[in-house]
Image (cartoon, grey):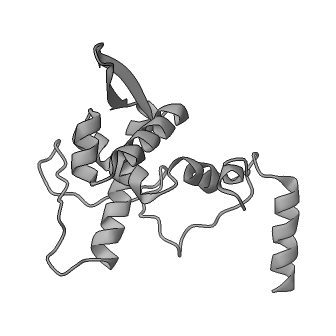
Amino acid sequence: MLKNKIGTQACSIARSAAVIDDAWVLLILREAVFGSRRFGDFMAFTGAQPSVVSDRLKRLVDAGVLEQSLYDEHPPRYEYRLTEMGRDLQPVLMALTKWGDTHLDAGGGPPLVDTHTSCGHDTDPTVVCGHCAESLTSENVRSSVGLGADPDTVAQRADAVRRR
């Protein structure tokens, strides 16, 4: 399936993947969370070429993840800040960091440690049930069809399950 069709699926993961579609986007988001605002900082801290940074910043602005504001008129220069939509990605980035630290450690330990500013302790992102606060795992979560599901996809999945 073409990348531009991924975002039209009735699937939250597919629509999210259409926005966060490559490693450079993740690295730019990492830097935005760390406080980078300017083009040169995104280039320096990600190691990406100018054309890559320019393209990914434009995509993130178009998607509503970053907002662009002019800080110098001659020549035109812009700052990029996370929108609410972008700030909502921080827990996702923290979970991805934890996954990388757990499964892809190069042997030196985590390169970054998050500290919870309210209590002052190092923190590990954990997904918990909003009702009972129990940690969620692949063993205790079941997905079911939601209101936004595509009826054809639901039928195809039901057929696939019956064939197992």
The number of numbered discs placed on residues in the rendered structure image is 0
Q: Residue furthest front?
A: 75
| On screen, residue 108 above or below 118 | below
| Viewer-proximal residue among 104 and 162 | 104
Q: Residue furthest top?
A: 73
Image quadrant in which the C terminus is located: bottom right
For residue 23, which quarter of the picture? bottom left
Q: Is residue 88 left or right of residue 2?
A: left
| Viewer-proximal residue among 31 and 141 | 31
Q: Residue furthest left?
A: 120
Q: Is residue 8 left or right of residue 78?
A: right
Rendered residue at 28%/43% (across/down)? 42
Rendered residue at 17%/59% (across/down)? 113
Query: Residue 26's spot in the image, x, y percent?
Result: 39, 53
Q: Is residue 60 left or right of residue 154?
A: left
Query: Residue 7's spot in the image, x, y percent?
Result: 66, 48
Query: Residue 86's spot in the image, x, y percent?
Result: 42, 38
Rendered residue at 16%/51% (across/down)? 115
Image quadrant in which the N terminus is located: bottom right
| On screen, residue 70 above or below 2 | above
Q: Is residue 106 visible?
A: yes
Query: Residue 67's spot in the image, x, y percent?
Result: 41, 27
For residue 103, which quarter of the picture? bottom left
Rendered residue at 33%/17% (across/down)? 70
Q: Is residue 92 visible?
A: no
